[in-house]
Amino acid sequence: MARRKRKEENGSEAPARSAAILRGLRLAGWILAFSMAAGGAGFFVFEWKRFLSRDPRFALAEEDDAAGRMTVEGNRRVPRAAVLRVFAADRGRSVSDIDLERRRQELRRIDWVRDAAVRRVWPDRLMVRIQEREPAAMIQVPAGISGRFGEPLRMQPALIDADGVILPMNGPVQGSLPLLLGVRREQDIEERGRRVRLMLRILNELSPAAARIPEVDLTDPENVRISYQTPEHLVLLVLGNERYLERLNVFLSHYDSIRDRLSHRAVLDLTTEGRITLVEASSEDSR
């Protein structure tokens, strides 16, 4: 009886073992098939990259002529030649081998370039899109020794954008930009940027009269001064650190009554509530 029972149990276990073996073989087959497919795909990708790298049909032209001209867009001030120099080492190489992000970072180091985008145009071209910086103001930077007593440094104009990046004068400036005082090359870029953005905020608040403001002095950002062009004189207005438009309007509302007492570059303090104080011009103010 016991022998018959064991025989029946062994008979029922055999199909279960067979099913488990079949499942294992099936799984092994899937793993093998997947491995072969992955290996084949990897080999295909490797061979495809090697094909792109070696086939001369994908090589960037050696010369920037009509047949191999690189497309450069957005460069109004940035010379095309400066852009092409970044890719000089890539001439004759496959466009698939060019590190586009590295070239983008190199383009961003060119004067006037704020950002850049580089993409491949198959089979053998590159397209570069330049985003140039927009000047927000003019500044004065040292250009050498003047040899004159009292003004030992010779100054020259430069431009600056809202990020605080100083830009060289590269051709005529479009439009009218204010002269920003109180910004120097030795200041860090964050500080320069803060002062430029403060100037822009002030001019935006004074927008009805901004065309008559050729200079903004932020030597002391807590005591803002502007130059204001009246019909007769250029006067310096001390606005402090708040309510710029309100204080300018105090000057404008009383201008007719004080115009005869004003001289060129007279300094008027408007920081006292509702009052205009005539300040004697210093040698700096009368320059």
Image: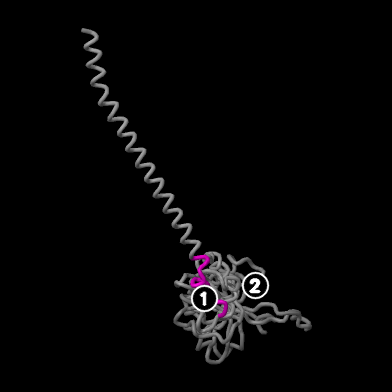
**Amino acid type shown at disc 1:** Glu
- Asked whether residue 211 appears in the rendered view, the answer is yes
- x, y (%) of residue 164? 57, 70
Q: Secondary structure at mark 1?
A: strand
Few, some or many residues within 10 Å of mark 1 (<14, 14–19, 20+): some
Residue range corresponding to the magenta coloring: 52-63
**Foreground of the two, 177 or 88:** 88
- x, y (%) of residue 32? 39, 42
> Residue beneath label 2, please?
184
Q: Earlier in the sequence, mark 2 or mark 1?
A: 1
Please tell me the numbered disc located at residue 193: none
- For the point 49% across and 77% down, which residue is it? 203
- x, y (%) of residue 216? 57, 78
Is 124 one of the magenta-colored residues? no
- Asked whether residue 277 appears in the rendered view, the answer is no
Quadrant of the snapshot with the N terminus: top left
> Residue beneath label 1, please?
132
**Foreground of the two, 76 or 280:** 76
Residue 30 horizontal side relative to residue 43, left or right: left
**Amino acid type shown at disc 2:** Arg
- The correct choice, above or below, for 150 with respect to 49 in the image is below
Q: CA distance from mark 2 to mark 1?
A: 22 Å
Quadrant of the snapshot with the C terminus: bottom right
- x, y (%) of residue 76? 52, 82
